Amino acid sequence: MPRERKKIPGVDPKLLIKDAAKLLPDPSRRLFLRGAASLGALATLTGCDIIDGPTAESALRVMSRFNDWVQARLFSATTLAPEYPESAITRPFPFNAYYSEDEAPDVDGESYQLEIGGLVDNKKPWTLPELYKLPEVSQITRHVCVEGWSAIGSWQGVKLSDFLKMIGADTKAKYVWFQCAEGYSNTIDMPTALHPQTQLTLKFDHRILPRAYGFPIKIRIPTKLGFKNPKYVTAMWVQNNDAGGYWENQGYNWFSGQ
Amino acid sequence: MTIEATNSSMVPDSAAGPIVHPRWVRVTHWVNALAMFMMIGSGWQIYDASPLFRFIYFPSQIALGQWLAGALLWHFAAMWLLAINGVIYVTLGIATGRFRRKLFPIRPRDVVRDFLAALRGKLAHDDLSVYNAVQRLLYVGVILAGIVIVLSGLSIWKPVQFKYLTALFGGYDVARYVHFFAMASIVGFLAVHVALALIVPKSLRAMIVGR
């Protein structure tokens, strides 16, 4: 199926930027659960709870944590995300973030070092030439955004499970935490970090990862929603405490598995 | 008030009549109504984050959750209520024989006849325990739409873990459209269903008190 320019419903660069602006942290954001709580209270809770917003808020958060637990059990270490032919790649692959493309981090590849920390034997930081020398794996998979749209991309890099073993990471630890150049962050569960398709991505479509897609490092996780695929990664920590993440802390489901 | 006063079904003596809807039907009906209210309301807010159609947009005043993350919290909490209640309803509907007795057979000729009678306002509602052919068709249709909306929802939620289900719907992107149109048909059903329940108030009463 030759598809020159695949149109993705609802994805328009201008709209994306507008969306991003809409999603910018805003004090009114904090009000959303209170508002939701009053509606939900009308529907679900008894009289005195109608004005008791935090009751509904904490109930929804508890359900979200329960859904993390369910998803961790639904997750299979051997179930692979579908892979697609080259012809299915979405071109142009959308840029997506909570900021516009010209505000994206501009990381200097020359001086860049990937910082390694936590429960790892060898914490030596990695330069890009060192990372480019590692064995390369490739995938053409579907990126699914929490907003609903999806796009198929081609990513190359190092299998994260191999990299974790190489640096002597304690793979019995619970989490891997990623810090990004713009202050974004993500914590993922160790089973997902060890999934065969989870990739420390250095290239998009066989070319060095462009700035728009997360130069110098993106963590490509086809078993997670897009926002759980951090870009512009500067540090990776293996640890037992959940350090949360940029969107997760604002209410998106923590596990967000696919 | 005048409707209540003149409606024969509201006078006490009919309260001794046979049970039209057993308790499990009434409980699952209203739990489903609540779950649908939460799922559709939050679903509209989620839809707005990446609309499928440029001309369809749901104002957040009529949606649930205020913004995407809030709506997702609602959607993925209420889905448990919808799914568990739905499984109980369908299981009991089949096991008790109620579906077979009440919803079948559906003959096309009867559907046309009852539909035309309904348009002329000549459809009888004397016996609430017997569904006319149009009712049967709509109830079976909405149960099927409910099954499709849950399965397409699962295939959007877990396109990797349930990838064969997602493939059955024609892939992730197609499953989103299926999920949307299943919602649209349920909302369409609701418009007719609620309007008719208000036109024939004793049917609403039967769904609350059973007779």
Image: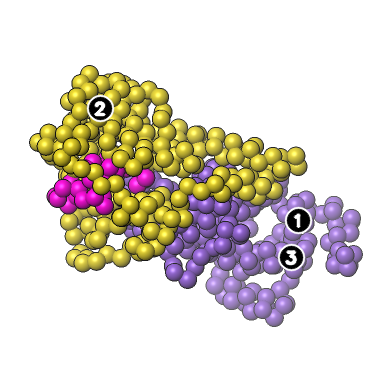
Chain colours: A yellow, B purple
Disc 3 crowd, CA 10 A, few/some/many (<14, 14-19, 20+): few
Within the image, what quadrant is residue A121 found in? top left
Three-letter amino acid code at the position of disc 1: Ala
Identified at 43% across, 42% down, the residue is: A247
The x, y position of residue B23, in whole percent, is 71, 46
Identified at 70% across, 67% down, the residue is: B196
Task: Specify the segment rendered in magenta.
Answer: A203-232
Q: Nearer the viewer, residue B79 or B116?
A: B79
Residue found farthest to the top? A121
Vertical comparison of A204 with B116: above or below? above
Q: Which mark is residue B206?
A: 1
Vertical comparison of B86 with A183: above or below? below
Q: Which residue is mark 3?
A: B198
Which element type, helix, strand or loop, lies under badge 2?
strand
CA gap between label 3 and label 2 equals 66 Å
Q: Which mark is residue A27?
A: none
Q: Nearer the viewer, residue A6 or A53?
A: A53
User: Which chain letter goes with mark 3?
Assistant: B
Q: Which residue is mark 2?
A: A116
User: Which chain letter goes with mark 2?
Assistant: A
Which element type, helix, strand or loop, lies under badge 1?
helix
Vertical comparison of B150 with B183: above or below? above
